[in-house]
Amino acid sequence: MAAAATAAAVVPSSSKTETYTDTKRKDDIRQANISAARAVADAVRTSLGPKGLDKMISSASDNSVIITNDGATILNHLNPLQPAAKMLVDLSKSQDSAAGDGTTTVVVVAGSLLRHCSSLLSSGIHPTVISDALHKTSLKAVDILTAMSVPVELSDRESLIKSASTSLNSKVVSQYSSLLAPLAVDAVLSVVDPQKPDLVDLRDIKIVKKLGGTVDDTEMVKGLVFDKKVSHAAGGPTRVENAKIAVIQFQISPPKTDIEQSIIVSDYSQMDRILKEERNYILGMIKKIKATGCNVLLIQKSILRDAVTDLSLHYLAKAKILVVKDVEREDIEFITKTLNCLPIANIEHFRVEKLGHADLVEEVSLGSGEGKVVKITGIKDMGRTTTVLVRGSNQLVLDEADRSLHDALCVVRCLVNKRFLIAGGGAPEIELSRQLGAWSKVLHGMEGFCVKSFAEALEVIPYTLAENAGLNPIAIVTELRNRHAQGEINAGINVRKGQITNILEENVVQPLLVSTSAIMLATECVRMILKIDDIVTVR
């Protein structure tokens, strides 16, 4: 048989006889891509769900250690060399930017789909046929999910908090979800613009991390918080009421020459003249600042020369002006939006109308040896922004609290964009699996076969949830299928009790957008990997 095939390959092809073409290489490359992508999916699979395990990521370059079970964070730090594996890393990034939560889910679903596609390919189905069937199925899946979702109003704060706490429950800081969930909801609702009620820009919520205390000390501040001290150099004020605040981008220090050069002074009288000029120059600037009634200065970090010198700080302290220096360049936009003021780039443009107004600017001590922060509260005509001050006993907990809070904020943002809730705990996946399985029986030919595989692939989510919780996955998934077949749409795995209950009543809910975008993105990624039949390396 093999000899005949080889013979067929050797015979020069005429238009009438069928020729044997070797597709071995293309199949090998496809299989290599699929196995590489599945290896990435398996790496994060154990960290899915509330009982998911955490990963410790140790970086050799800077000896940093991160402990997390957020899929996007884990994959961000993996640097796979195989191009198909990189696609899964990008997949979790796009889920992170589209929905913010469900980053592990999307990668696990993609891995499971690839596993089923690989068996379809070995059955001899053409990749294009599989790809088209997957696309058709994903659209149908989104319709099914939308049909089983529950609409929610933004005024219904309870539902928003439930979905935020579901997101937090799978994180390292899950015991603080009762504190962080309401905080995330209030933060997002306070920045929603009534003119554009469907849009939330998370850049309007600034998260300031400060080491010390516990996560319980995390608070939301209506105003601004700087993780810096007030400049104490010359005994200036540390508390100002009825503050007039200026954000300046110029330096209050003697000017330097544009080119590198040194001035040689031969006698003392000239030296005195230089010092006197410097003094007068700085005094002139400070008088202009004081003339507008400004009493708080936020000074942007400067690269060229010192933004302030000891001399200028001394005069500013004499003028009773509170100074916060080294404000980062990227924070300027947020600060000016919050204070409703304009940044001032030159001393000549220093005018009253460019100042921001606040009731109180003060330096607050966070406890013994834990440093200080500057808080600005009671801002007049405040922009739609808010600041969250996150605390943590060590750097690992602090970073994880920051990432978890970001996920919770994203979940609330999803609900603002698309106001539908859906059950969690593997319920939507099993329901999809059941309905798509029924739909596949109606379809003809190869398509039905592919849809059935898609339906089976979705069972990986409840299976993994059960497995990570230490339950018997096969028994649990079979029981789940049975309950859904009897019409209990919202039956899901209750990981805490280790049994199957109505998940909506247990308040395990997630935004519809998280599930739909996970299915769409995973399908797109799998289709892309299937369509690749060769890797060409170019120099």
Image: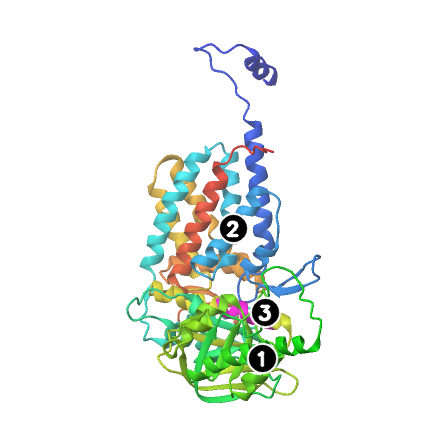
Which of marks 1 and 3 precedes in the sequence? 1
Q: Which residue is mark 3?
A: 399
Task: Report the disc number at residue 279.
Answer: 1
Q: Could you tell me the amino acid type at mark 1?
A: Arg
**Which structural element holds mark 1?**
helix
Q: Which residue is mark 2?
A: 90
Residue 269 pos. (x, y %): 67, 78
Mark 2 and mark 3 in contact (Cβ < 8 Å)? no
Label 2 crowd bin: few (<14), some (14–19), many (20+), radius 10 Å: some
Quarter of the view holding residue 196: bottom left
Where is the N terminus found, in terms of image quarters?
Answer: top right
Which of marks 2 and 3 precedes in the sequence? 2
Front of the two marks 3 and 1: 1
- In three-dimensional space, the C-alpha distance between marks 3 and 1, rounded to whole angstroms, equals 45 Å
Q: Residue placed at 39% from the left, 64% from the top?
A: 414
Q: Could you tell me the amino acid type at mark 2?
A: Asp
Q: With respect to residue 411, does 535 lie above or below?
A: above
- In three-dimensional space, the C-alpha distance between marks 3 and 2, rounded to whole angstroms, equals 22 Å
